[in-house]
Amino acid sequence: MFNINKSLLYDPGQVHYIVDSDFRTLAQGWSRADGTGPLDLWGARNPGYVFYAPGRTAQPSGATDAAAMQAAIDALVDFRGDTLFFTPGTYTPATALAINVPDARWLGPIVSSPEAARANLVAGVAAAFTTTADADRMEVGYLRFVPLTAATMWSVVTGTDRLHFHDFVFDTNGITASTSTIFVDTAGTCDGSLFEKFVLLTDDSTGAMFTITGTLTRFQIKDFTHFHVGANALAISLVDDNAAGASGIIVGPGRGVTGAAGAVTTLYDLVNKTTAETNVTIDRFYGSVGYATTTTIVTSAGAVNDIDIVDSWIATVEGGAGRGAYVGAA
């Protein structure tokens, strides 16, 4: 039905489809009253692999988005690399999902730009997406995430490792301001995980996109762009690191753009680390004028050598003398 990814042709995993009501309307022709639409025929030929949100009795389903999504998750086979494919539409689970399948893939339609994502996952409850220790090596891509105000969206528990999130957008624009609005809380190890090729959208005082409260290592955040619109202050934009034992963290390359001087204070905030050495590296982060200051791009409660900054610069206004190096607090 969809050419999700050519690489899947050589993968034994099964594709399961989540179908939004907007995608199966009669007007669009994907479904038809007589059951002869492309989606109807696909579901008939593949019983057990198409899940309707909210449910439909003719196929595996549930009465709510959360029930349909959980049914689809439960149908995935461990270790096989099964794909949960989200057709265009909006999915708002109002019950926390139990994400517990190793090597699972969650993908939307492939798009050329993260902001063009056609499938939207909206948190209807705190920790709507909660992993268990079994959800290792999970891949998530080509999706738009919208949080619930004052809540964490993804809660990653101890033992969930080697996650790969890519080609996505985290969109907080229009969400009621709260510094407790967070995309991912790595309460567990999350070792060997990578978040890349994404866009962060903010327009008010949200929380950091990532909070680190577990002793993770080998954690990368790279190839990202943050757009902060308006003059509302944003204290910590990307990472609030509260784990003294977390180390081996790389952030960058990345870009930050804000329309008002001083609207964004800090990119990365960290506690005093257990070992006074380079636990975190900021690599090639470039900020517009007003994206923090040269000394507040990083704020640290510990020794100055807990974190290092390499090849990172803040712009100058037109006609200025030149860029300035981000150096962090002295």
Image: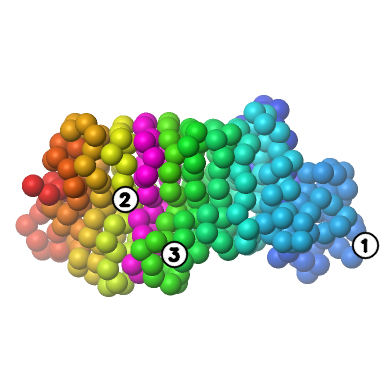
SS at mark 3 in the image: loop
Which of the two labelled residues, at mark 1 and mark 3, occupies the earlier sequence position?
1
Is 306 colored magenta in this rendering? no
Q: Secondary structure at mark 2?
A: strand
Q: Cα distance, mark 2 to mark 1?
A: 54 Å
Q: Residues within 10 Å of mark 2 (few under 14, many from 20)?
A: many
Please, what is the three-letter code of the amino acid marked with disc 1?
Answer: Asp
Please name the amino acid that badge 3 sits on. Answer: Ala
In the image: residue 254, left or right of residue 319: right
Q: How is the image coloured?
A: rainbow
Residue 327 numbered mark, or none: none
Position of residue 157 measured from the top left corner of the image (x, y, whole percent) = 49, 41
Q: Disc 3 marks which residue?
A: 150
Q: Amino acid at mark 2?
A: Asp
Q: Pick out the residue farthest to the right.
A: 34
> What's the magenta region?
194-222
Q: Residue at x 78, y 44 (%)?
A: 49
Mark found first going from the N terminus, 2 or 1: 1
Q: Nearer the viewer, residue 111 or 214?
A: 214
The residue to which callout 2 is attached is 240
Badge 1 local density, few (<14 within 10 Å), some, or many (20+)?
A: few
Q: Quadrant of residue 208?
A: bottom left
Residue behind mark 1: 34
